[in-house]
Image (cartoon, rainbow, N blue to C red):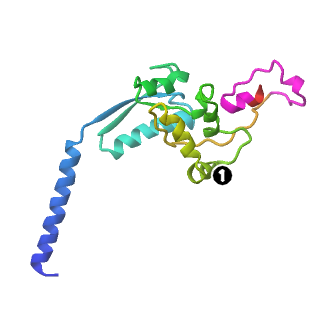
Amino acid sequence: MKRSTRWTAVALAVAGALAVSAAQAQQPKVNWKMQSAFGSQLTHLGVAATRLVKDVEEMTNGNFVIKFHEPGALVPVLECFDAASKGSVDACWSPAGNYAGKYAALSFFTAVPFGPGYGEFMAWKIFGNGNKLRDEIYAKHDLIAFDALAIGPETSGWFRREIKSLDQVKGLKMRFFGLRAKVMQ
């Protein structure tokens, strides 16, 4: 390479780096409030939310800051969908199934009871138009959903004693949401 061509290439590289640096410096800072459905110390679900907040801030050199809020700190957990739709909060860390009472179809975008494993579930979402269906529901409310965590399919639960008949289920205290709650009813 000729000496003048080499210096031209170096000059262009330096100019490009300076332009990128100047553009980053001029980016406005974005600050969001994110309501979580899970406490920050909850294994897997809560810890993943705090990790996401940290990662976004690091990846954007502090230009995009998400403030994590514990469950109920801004709005009741089951009202986060509507709060984000209206702009009261910027984001919700919450499974779609939490809002299945409002939109039954959202049950299929969380953990389907006795459903497919991670691979099959994510394949359906990404390649089988599952995310397209989810996005249509969210778009009606000016919301966008991102997959930032996956939990496996859930079964019927853990019990202190073996359940051998439907009569033993009557009156048994259980906590389920979404489609699992409908199945157990």
Secondary structure of the residue carrying tag 1 is: helix
**What is the quadrant of residue 168 in the picture?**
top right
Magenta stretch encompasses residue 164: yes
Say left or right for 25 vs 83: left
Q: Quadrant of residue 65?
A: top left
Going 49% across and 24% down the picture, which residue do you hit? 82
Question: Is residue 71 visible in the rendered structure shown here?
Answer: no
Q: Could you tell me which residue is drawn at 80 percent across and 21 percent down?
A: 172
- 129 relative to 14, above or below: above
In the displayed orientation, state which residue is furthest to the left: 4
Q: Which residues are magenta?
A: 160-182
Q: Is residue 174 magenta?
A: yes
Q: Residues within 10 Å of mark 1 (few under 14, many from 20)?
A: few
Q: Pick the quarter of the image with the C terminus.
A: top right
Q: What residue is disc 1 on?
A: 120
Provide residue 55's location: percent of width, then percent of height: 40, 43
The residue shown at (56%, 31%) is 42
* Left or right, residue 133 beside residue 84: right
Q: Residue 35's x, y, as percent? A: 46, 27
Provide residue 95's location: percent of width, then percent of height.
Answer: 57, 34
The image quadrant of residue 86 is top left
Q: Write the residue at 63% across / 52% down.
A: 119
Q: Position of residue 64 (x, y in %)?
A: 33, 38
Tally of marks = 1
Front residue of 82/6: it is 82
